[in-house]
Amino acid sequence: MAINFHFDPVDLPPECKELRQEVRAFLREEIAAGSFSPHSGRSGSEKAFARKVGTRGWIGMTWPKQYGGHERSHLERYVVIEEMLAHRAPTRSYSTADRQSGPVILRYGQEAVKEKILPKIASGELCFCIGLSEPNSGSDVFAASTRATKTEGGWLVNGRKIWTSNAHNSDYMIALLRTSPSTKENRRHGLTQFLIECKTPGITIRPIVNLTGSHDFNEVVFDDAFVPDLHLIGEVDMAWKQATDELAYERSGPDRWLETFPALVELVRRAGSEPSERLAEGIGREVAHLATLRRMSVSVAGMLQAGKTIWRPCAACRSASPACCRPARRRRSRPPRSRTSAPIGSRLCPTRSACWRRPAAIRRRIRTTTALRRHCATRP
Ligand SMILES: Cc1cc2nc3c(=O)[nH]c(=O)nc-3n(C[C@H](O)[C@H](O)[C@H](O)COP(=O)(O)OP(=O)(O)OC[C@H]3O[C@@H](n4cnc5c(N)ncnc54)[C@H](O)[C@@H]3O)c2cc1C
């Protein structure tokens, strides 16, 4: 089946250029004050940094003022995120809430929750995590089996979420839970989204330490954890559309491909002044990918601003990420495996031919490492 992708060409307006300078000045001050290191990405207090960013009005930028937002454009928000990530600023404490949890609450949450939670996110006070993956439902997110059962005044949650990034530092999780079995006609039926306070009795957050010894992932166990009715998000049993929207928010920004940009910079540094032909080709290919992805990503921000549907372009952006920048993929449902089918990236990336044609041109242009360095050092 052929899928048509469309990416509107977008030029950043003058207010974005001014804002970029403002953000750079702020980040320079923060670096000078020792708030974080742009080289190692290490930081002091992520919470304190989040509050400063909140005070500047750079969290919840596009949200209505009545909920603590700032009613600025998606393109302005894009510029702020791009600068933060290019400088390796410690955005971890607020980025999930700013990017996806806040917008989900804004769109589907109950009024009292919007009034209580959104201003706190915008001021940098709240940290959120994402409760989608389970031990038996990873890529196939709609197979979730952690249950929410109706009880008086709310719901009792039982089951397990896994790979929950930063849950141990989070105040809230937005979780996708099973409230009814799926039907034959619609396997996406029966899932509901809830806002869950991480300190609720009955919730245990266990660390999953990775091979390098770092703790970022967690397993979150629910044992009769009570969630009030007020924290139901959207319609019971009908969350698949909301979850798809949430994933579109997750994929729409520059976060996914820029957060690993330092790996490319380091590769160029290590390549030195006389990289082998093969290495220069590889770097050229990655740079070409990134340049293409950036255009796609800015375009998504422009389309969001114009109120267009974006989940398909967002999926393309994420799937087309270059190898050094690509996180684990999440599919909405598990299609049958086929040995002959093309890799998912080639099926989704509308600019694939461009991606593969450009390296030769870029290679010629960036043959010397001096030029290569200049290219990579140019901030978007
Ligand atoms: C850095 C990072 C942070 C994460 N943070 C969170 C988080 O905060 N919250 C959360 O809920 N989840 C999180 N995840 C989980 C993640 O998004 C995926 O859901 C999960 O990693 C995939 O599930 P799984 O490990 O069970 O793999 P599986 O779904 O079992 O997949 C295993 C392998 O099979 C492949 N595969 C699966 N289906 C198919 C198919 N139909 N055809 C071909 N190949 C297929 C996959 O590509 C993969 O290589 C995170 C993952 C990473 C890497």
Image (spheres, rainbow, N blue to C red):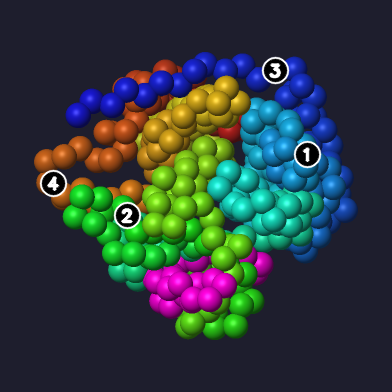
- Residue at 50% x, 25% y: name it: 308
- Mark 2 neighbour density, 10 Å: few (under 14) some (14–19) many (20 or more): many
Between marks 1 and 3 in the image, the one whose residue lies nearer the viewer: 1
- Residue at 57% x, 66% y: name it: 229
- Mark 1 neighbour density, 10 Å: few (under 14) some (14–19) many (20 or more): few
Q: Which is more toward the observer, 221 or 298?
A: 221
Upstream in sequence: badge 2 or badge 3:
3
| Position of 85 relative to 230 (above/below) | above
Q: Which mark is residue 65?
A: 1
Q: Amino acid at mark 3?
A: Pro
Q: Amino acid at mark 2?
A: His
Q: CA distance from mark 2 to mark 1?
A: 34 Å
Residue 36, percent from left and from top: 76, 55
Number of numbered labels in the structure image: 4
Q: Which residue is mark 2?
A: 189
Between marks 4 and 2 in the image, the one whose residue lies nearer the viewer: 2
Q: Which residue is mark 3?
A: 13
Find residue 169 and report its image quarter. bottom right
**Callout 4 touching callout 2 (CB < 8 Å):** no
Q: Does any atom of ligand 1 lie closer than 8 Å to the CB of label 4? A: yes
Q: CA distance from mark 1 to mark 3?
A: 22 Å
